[in-house]
Amino acid sequence: MLDDRKALSDVIVAEIEADAARYGDKRRTLIEAVAPVVLTRTVPDEPLTVTLSRHGWIRSRQGHALDASQFAWKAGDGPLAILETRTVHPVIVLDTMGRA
């Protein structure tokens, strides 16, 4: 039966401390605060040509001043937009419903 003078939390704390003294040793892993790790991702800055077809397909090719007549399209499809950009610049396409 639980001693009236000790609260249940005191008993739990005492049992945990007793187990730590009995089973604990200096080889246990110590949890310590460390400096946060900062990851940096580098993207090469290269010329890029992005093509958008009339049927909504997007493709990219390396370089600028490409001959658009040499691009292959599926039957019934063709170019809607050709954009010369760089790999470090985001490209966002909006459709007629406002979706990106």
Image (spheres, rainbow, N blue to C red):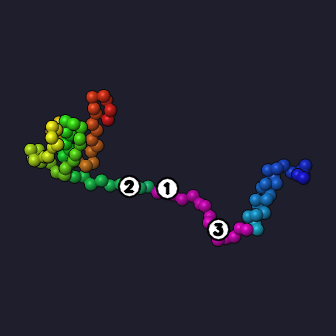
The boundaries of the magenta stretch are: 23-37
Name which residue lies at 73% across and 64% down. 20
Q: Which residue is mark 3?
A: 28
Q: Which mark is residue 36?
A: 1
Label 1 packing within 10 angstroms: few (<14), some (14-19), many (20+): few
Identify the residue position indicated by label 2 in the image.
40
Task: Tell me the distance, in whole angstroms, between the alpha carbons under discs 1 and 2.
Answer: 13 Å
Quarter of the image for residue 94 reads top left
Q: Secondary structure at mark 2?
A: loop
Tell me, yes or no, if residue 85 can be seen here. no
Residue 5, compared with residue 53, is above or below; it is below
> Where residue 59 sits in the image (x, y, percent)?
22, 45
Q: Residue at x 88, y 52 (%)?
A: 2
Is residue 66 positioned above or below 28 on the image? above
Q: Amino acid at mark 2?
A: Thr
Residue 83 lies, in percent from the top left, at 18, 41
Q: Name the N-terminal-most of marks 1 and 3.
A: 3
Q: For residue 23, which quarter of the picture?
A: bottom right
Instruction: Check disc 3: other Cα within 10 Å, few if <14, some if 14-19, many if 20+.
Output: few
